[in-house]
Image: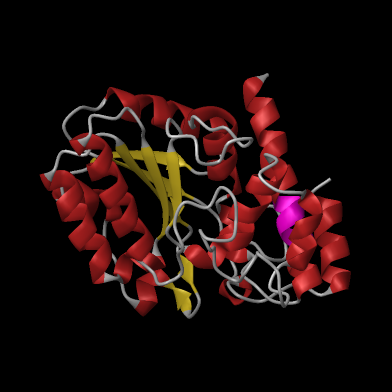
Amino acid sequence: METKFIEEKAKEIRREIIKMLGEAKSGHPGGSLSGADIIAALYYKEMKLDPANPKWEGRDRFVLSKGHAAPLLYSVLALKNYFKIDILKTLRKTGSILQGHPDMNKVPGVEMSTGSLGQGFSAAVGMALSFKIYNKENRVYALLGDGECQEGIVWEAAMAAAHYNLDNLVAILDNNGLQIDGKCSEVMCLGSLHNKWTAFGFHVIDVDGHKIDQIIDAFDEARTIKGKPTLILAKTIKGKGVSFMEDRAEWHGSAPSMEQVILALEELK
């Protein structure tokens, strides 16, 4: 029953992503849709949160390191009642709190302003280190893209996380294989991400990033790991849930027309 509930929440997140991007006529659907199952599992199962008190000290932290997937984060925050869902219609519009990249000073529930790739993960490492220093039980989660892992700052942060034994840190890699210019393997081949993150001192768990039960099991396993951070390597499909967007790099940063919105929402019933 719990898995079915989270699956429906992921579908609801996808519907809101499509609607807000259609309204905005700009934004990033591909990588937002691919991370919906991961985000649903985080916000509806894994993390300690209090939407009525976004600054509660006991909360876990989530950082959207691939900040261009802001519609993904905005959708779940609205559905969790951090702000009114009608605000989603204002995405990228003048005066809106919902900018093209998340702003921690304007949006309740956003823990870190992100957009410059790699910097969000670095901030997440800093948060986890702070909790360790002050003996806090809070956990930190960061969602990265595979194209983002072409940034050197990611690997500097990974080294620091392993060096300081940050077992309260869980990185989730949305491994959809595509970035704005095409296949990651052709733009800048990353080789074996499993082997790389293992070599950098992480406990690595491979999952199907669209299977809720596998994602939840991975979070449970991460809680048992002591003395090192965890990387959940989630194999995903860019544009997941909308057939004409799936596995197509051109939907990295192109918003759907209103006709395409109608088609997409029909598929996401």
- Residue 181 x/y as whole percent: 48, 80
Quadrant position of residue 43: top right
**Viewer-proximal residue, 50 or 245?**
50
**Viewer-proximal residue, 188 or 80?**
80
Q: Is residue 175 left or right of residue 201?
A: right
Q: Reply above or below: 165 against 126.
A: above
Q: Is residue 224 left or right of residue 96?
A: left
17 is within the stretch colored magenta: yes
Q: Reply above or below: 95 against 53.
A: below
Residue 239 in sight = no
Question: Disc count in the image?
Answer: 0
- Residue 221 x/y as whole percent: 34, 26
Q: Reply above or below: 256 against 133.
A: below
User: Measuring 26% from the left and 56% from the top, which residue is drawn there?
Assistant: 192
In the rendered view of the protein, which quadrant contains the C terminus? Answer: top right
Q: Reply above or below: 187 against 30.
A: below
Residue extending furthest left? Answer: 163
Quadrant position of residue 145: bottom left
User: Measuring 45% from the left and 46% from the top, which residue is drawn there?
Assistant: 62
- Residue 11 x/y as whole percent: 72, 44
Q: Is residue 254 left or right of residue 196?
A: right
**Viewer-proximal residue, 140 or 34?**
140
User: Measuring 20% from the left and 47% from the top, which residue is drawn there?
Assistant: 161
Residue 103 in sight = yes
Secondary structure mostly seen in magenta is: helix
Q: Is residue 229 left or right of residue 106?
A: left
Q: Which residues are magenta?
A: 14-19
Residue extending furthest top? Answer: 1
126 is within the stretch colored magenta: no
Quadrant position of residue 31: bottom right
User: Measuring 25% from the left and 43% from the top, which residue is drawn there?
Assistant: 130
In the rendered view of the protein, which quadrant contains the N terminus? Answer: top right
